[in-house]
Image (cartoon, rainbow, N blue to C red):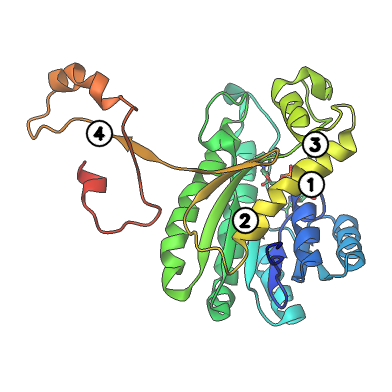
Amino acid sequence: MTAAEVRFDGRVVIVTGAGAGMGRSHATLLGARGAKVVVNDVREDAAVRVVGEVTAAGGEAVAAVHDVATDDGARALVHQAVQAFGGVDALVNNAGGAEKCPFTETSWDLFERTQKLNVQGPFFVTRYAWPHLAASGSGRVVMVASKSAVIGGVQDFAHYATAKGAVLAMTRQLASSGAADGIHVNAVLPTALTRVANDGATGGNVALNPLKRGMAERLGIDPADAPRLAAVSAAVVSAVVAWLCHPGCTASGEFFNAVAGHTSQVVFATTTGITDPALSIESVRDGFTRIADTSHLAALPAIWDGDIAHFLG
Ligand SMILES: NC(=O)c1ccc[n+]([C@@H]2O[C@H](COP(=O)([O-])OP(=O)(O)OC[C@H]3O[C@@H](n4cnc5c(N)ncnc54)[C@H](O)[C@@H]3O)[C@@H](O)[C@H]2O)c1
């Protein structure tokens, strides 16, 4: 017996930045499974094209052309969703990204633009959608973060990783804020080959980039087949995002890795550490091996359960 198909009939879902890449994939999947999709993008032609794709897949959608990195745009997007479909049941804060730049060359302007798109955008679209998500009774918010926020070594992306780190903090705190109203807030840390040609180091040749080559191999796709790599690597992320939009998903405040068909929960954890009411520089030095011993980890809860050990050790 096959498990029942997951459906979103009657649910209104906003997907920001849905004119291309992963957002486009999330919008078409959700629409094909019955959701009424608000396809937001700052580029009208892209949003209209995706509305056509959702409709062709049997879904219902509306193009919502607004810049979510502005207060007016965030507010107008939610207003349009409510006007078009009568409410908001789920929101995917997908619009994001940044141009790479070495840390020591990062300008105030680039940093600020990066925060506006990746932090202020999701914060304010969610803020304006909040009363409608509460009215839904099973509101769901999916934040889109990045592995660069939790794993160092991604070159020339400190400004972007900083923004995505803020998205993780936002996810946890809003999950707490939404609990009483049944609003669940989670984050994905996706990787998809949406911009396969956009790789200065390899000139867009997927075979030369170990991560991208590994993803192509995992998905069983020829590394030279850029359009298929882009579509399939996004589609497997969409499966995770869509489930996080579903009322049947009970997680809240959690982070999920999603890459090349793999998904897993990402946790913040503490080591056993040391405890000494008279802690001195010398006891920190002498206990440092135990402080940093990761062989016994305790995951921090997404939402504080009142156990003071999470703060006191
Ligand atoms: N591609 C990856 O591997 C990867 C990795 C980690 C995180 N992410 C994150 O995933 C999300 C989607 O990435 P992608 O690669 O699919 O993106 P993409 O660049 O392919 O598409 C982004 C879409 O968002 C739209 N957009 C940009 N600014 C906007 C704004 N202010 N208002 C409304 N729409 C706007 C663009 O027009 C575009 O259609 C982003 O938040 C990105 O930071 C992507």
Q: Is mark 1 within 8 Å of ligand 1?
A: yes
The answer to whether mark 3 and mark 1 are in CB contact below 8 A is yes
Label number found at residue 272: 4
For residue 20, above or below residue 159: below
Q: Give the secondary structure at mark 3.
A: loop
The x and y percentages for residue 80 are 74, 74
Residue behind mark 1: 21
Residue nearest the viewer, comparing 1 with 303: 1
The answer to whether mark 2 and mark 1 are in CB contact below 8 A is no
Q: Is residue 276 left or right of residue 310?
A: left
Residue behind mark 2: 121
For residue 87, above or below residue 272: below
Q: Image quarter for residue 276?
A: top left
Please identify the quadrant where the N terminus is shown: bottom right
Is there any visible trace of residue 201 in the rendered image? no
For the residues labelled 2 and 3, the Cα–Cα distance comes to 22 Å
Residue nearest the viewer, comparing 11 with 250: 250
Q: Amino acid at mark 3?
A: Arg
Q: Is residue 270 left or right of residue 155?
A: left
